[in-house]
Image (cartoon, rainbow, N blue to C red):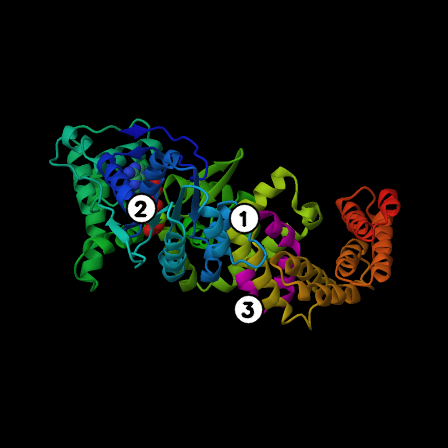
Amino acid sequence: METAPAPRAGCPVQLTTFIGREREIAAVDDLLQSTRLVTLTGVGGAGKTRLAAEVAARVTPRFEASAWVDLASLSDPALVAELVAATLGYREEAGRSAVQTMVHRLCECDTFVILDNCEHLVDACAEVAETLLKGCPSVRILATSREALGVPGEQAWLVPPLSLPAGVAAAEVLSSEAGRLFLERARAVRPAFSLDDASAPAVAQICRRLDGIPLAIELAAARVGVLAPQQIAARLDDSFKLLISSGRSTVPRHRTLRETIDWSHALLDPAEAALFRRLSVFAGTFSLDAVEAICPDAGVLDVLSSLVDKSLVVMETVGGEARYRLLETLRQYGHDRLTAADEVADLRRRHAQFFTELVAAREREMFGGAGERELTARLVAEEGNFRAAGDWAHETGDHTTSLRLCAALHWHWYARGHFREGWKRLQEALAHADGVPPLHAGKAYVAAAMTARLIGALDQVAPNAARAVALLRDQNDAWHLSYALVFLGVSTPDPAAAERLFIEATGLARAHAPGSVLLAFGLFWHGVLALNQRDLDGAERL
Ligand SMILES: Nc1ncnc2c1ncn2[C@@H]1O[C@H](COP(=O)(O)OP(=O)(O)OP(=O)(O)O)[C@@H](O)[C@H]1O
Ligand SMILES: [Mg+2]
C-alpha cells in the first residue's frame, strides 16, 4: 500500500510517500483496542513517528477528540502537561494545574492523544500519561520514544525494521519494503531511476547493510543523483569497514544509523556540512529568512536545496510557505558537529537575537491575544524557536533578552493557553530585572501582572502593575504605560483611585493609539468599574 500524502488535522503533514507497514499498523491498532497506552519504541530513524502518524490516521476517527503533541522541540519537563493541554485546546482553569484541568475536561469525551518523541522527557511524559490514564477512563495514548515510558499498564512495542529483499532479483527487491523505500526516494532525486536485474543486487545489499532502517535507506537512496547503486553499496561497505577498523568493533543495529549518517555527512562539501550543522540550532521547523539571518553562510538557498535533495533536511509547506526541519536524529548529529566546530555559543546567540527581534517588532499586533491569522500562524510555527531562545537567554544570564521575549510573547501565550510557561519564564527573568533597562523591565512587569491574573495569583497583580507603572513613567512609551495603568486600575480596590488610573490610561491611548485595541481595553475595564459601581450612565458614556 502506497498512500498519497494528505493533510490531516493535528498530524504533521507528510510530503513523501508512505511504504508498507500494513501488518504493523493493524497490530498497533489492535493493541490500542485492548491497551490504553502503547509506546512505539526503537532506534532513531526506525520509523516510530511515521508509523504513529499512519496509525493515528486510522484510529483518530473513532474518537471524539484527538491531539498530536510533538515533544521534540520542548526541553523543559515542567511544560509537558501544559503543552498537551494547550494542544487539546484546553485553557488552564483558575486554581487547577494543567493536568488537573485536562483530567477534568477529558473525562467528558473519548480522546486519543499522541505523544511524539518522548525520549528526552521520559519521566515527565510518564507522569502526564499516568495521570491521564488514571483520571480519565476514556483516554487512550500512543507514544513514540526511543525507550519505554515505564508506566503501569503500558504496552511497549518495538518498531521492526522494514522488510528486506528475499533475494537479489528486481522482483524480490521490489516486493520488500526496504527495496520499495529505496526506489521511491531514489526516484525523487532521479526520476528516471529504475530497478533492473543489474542494479537490484546492489540495492538489496544496501537495504540489508542498513538493517532496513528507514532513515538510513533514505540517506543512501538520496545519493543516486551522483552515484550508481553499486557505488553506494561499495562505499557504504568501505566506510563501515573503516569505522570497524578504527576500533568500533561490530556494527549492531543501533549503530548502523550513526554510521550511515557519518557516511552521508562525509560526502557533503564544506559549505553543505557547515550549513547542516548550523541548522541544528533551530528547534522544530524554520523558515528560509531565519536561516539567512542567523547562519553566516553565503548562498543559503542553494545549499539548503542540496541538503533537502540529500535527505538531510525535510521541506514542508505550511500555509503556502516553505518551512524546513531536521529529523530529530539528524538534528542531534548536527548539534554534535556544531559543538565540535565550537560554533554553538555564537549560533545560539544569533538565533536568540533573531527570534527576539522578530516577535518584539510585532508585539502590539498581538495585543489582546487576537493577532492577524498570518501572524498567529507564524508565532505558532516558531514556538520551538522561541523556547530555545528563552532557554538560551536564561542559561547565559542575558536578562534583557529574557524579559523582552516574555513581554513580547505574553499575549501569544495567552492566546495559546501557555499560562504556566509564561509565568515560569517571567518569574525566572524578573528575579534579575535590576540591571535591565527600565523600558524592558517595565513591559515585563505588566506582562507579569496580566499573567498573574490568568493563573489566579491575584495577590501578584497589583505589585507587578505598580512596578510596571513606576518604571514606564519616563520611558516615552505611552502604549505600555497606558496598558500598565489599566492593570494597576484593575487591581486597585479604591474605586475613585481606579477611575483616575483608567482615565489616565484611556487618555494616553486616545492620544497615541486612537482606534486601537489598547484603547478598547482601557475603556472596557473602565466600563466594568462603572458597572460594578452601578453607574450605568457612566458606563454608557464610555
Ligand atoms: N514506512 C515508511 N515509509 C516511508 N518512509 C518512512 C517509513 N518509515 C519511516 N520513514 C521515513 O524515515 C525517516 C525516519 O522516520 P521517523 O522520523 O518516523 O523515525 P523515528 O523512529 O521517529 O526517529 P527519531 O527517533 O529520530 O524520532 C523519515 O523521513 C520518515 O518519513
Ligand atoms: Mg520520531
| Disc sitting over residue 396 in the figure | 3
Mark 1 = which residue?
Answer: 382
Q: Is residue 203 in sight in this rendering?
A: yes
Q: Position of residue 528 (x, y in %)?
A: 78, 50
Residue type at the position of mark 1:
Glu
Quarter of the rendering occupied by the N terminus:
top left
Quarter of the rendering occupied by the C terminus:
top right
Q: Name the side, left or right, on which 518 lies relative to 286.
A: right
- Could you tell which of marks 2 and 3 lies nearer the N-terminus? 2
**Residue segment shown in magenta:** 390-416
Foreground disc of the pair 1, 3? 1
Q: Nearer the viewer, residue 86 or 70?
A: 86
Q: Name the side, left or right, on which 240 lies relative to 293.
A: left
Q: Position of residue 158 (x, y in %)?
A: 24, 49
Mark 2 = which residue?
Answer: 48
Magenta-highlighted stretch: main secondary structure? helix
- Determine the image quadrant of residue 212: top left
